[in-house]
Image: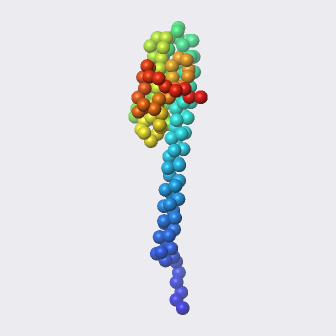
Amino acid sequence: MKNSKGFSLLELLIVVAIILIIATIAIPSLLRSRQAANESAAVANLRTINTAEVTYLSSSGGNYGDLNALVSAGLLDDTFIGTATRPKAGYIYSLTATGSDYTAFAEPASPNTGRFAYYSVPDAVVRYSTLGGAISNNQPGRSVQ
């Protein structure tokens, strides 16, 4: 009788195949979960920008500020600035402010980080758009609850 120690090649191949099947099932779910987390963070960050704009409006004589003004006033942290090179939670934030109006944008850094682009105006309602991530002031969007 032969005294064999270890695993045969067939046993190792079966284990590797089982691991690959489990990974094939788990990885897409993980990516969808990360995408949903990025989208939730984008909505929360736009609400933070809305709050900062209201605070800035009351202290600046009736004018809204851009991202640089909000950061220098201490209402936002500096991670919102320069996000084109390093996205914040998978999204790139921008803000256009003209006197008594503003539009805050959150656009996915890549198609894998988010399905929707979000924006908000002074009514503080966060809206989303599915039109390729490009949104403008005149574009209709749907509200996020």
Quarter of the image where one finds residue 109: top left
> Which residue is at 45% across, 16% downward?
97
Coordinates of residue 86 in the picture (x, y in percent) = 43, 35
Is residue 58 shown left or right of residue 131?
right
- Quadrant for the C terminus in the image: top right
Count of numbered circles on the image: 0
> Of all residues shown, which one is farthest toward the bottom?
1
Is residue 101 shown left or right of residue 85?
right
> Which residue is at 47% across, 20% downward?
103
> Of all residues shown, which one is farthest toward the right?
145
Eyeballing the image, is 51 above or below 133? above
- Quadrant for the N terminus in the image: bottom right
Viewer-proximal residue among 8 and 119: 119
Coordinates of residue 108 in the picture (x, y in percent) = 45, 34
In the rendered image, is residue 67 in sight?
no
In the rendered image, is residue 41 in sight?
yes
Eyeballing the image, is 28 above or below 130? below
> Of all residues shown, which one is farthest toward the top?
61
Viewer-proximal residue among 61 and 145: 145
Coordinates of residue 96 in the picture (x, y in percent) = 44, 19
> Which residue is at 49% across, 77% downward?
8
Coloring applied to the structure = rainbow
Eyeballing the image, is 43 above or below 31? above
> Which residue is at 43% across, 19% downward?
138
Coordinates of residue 85 in the picture (x, y in percent) = 40, 34
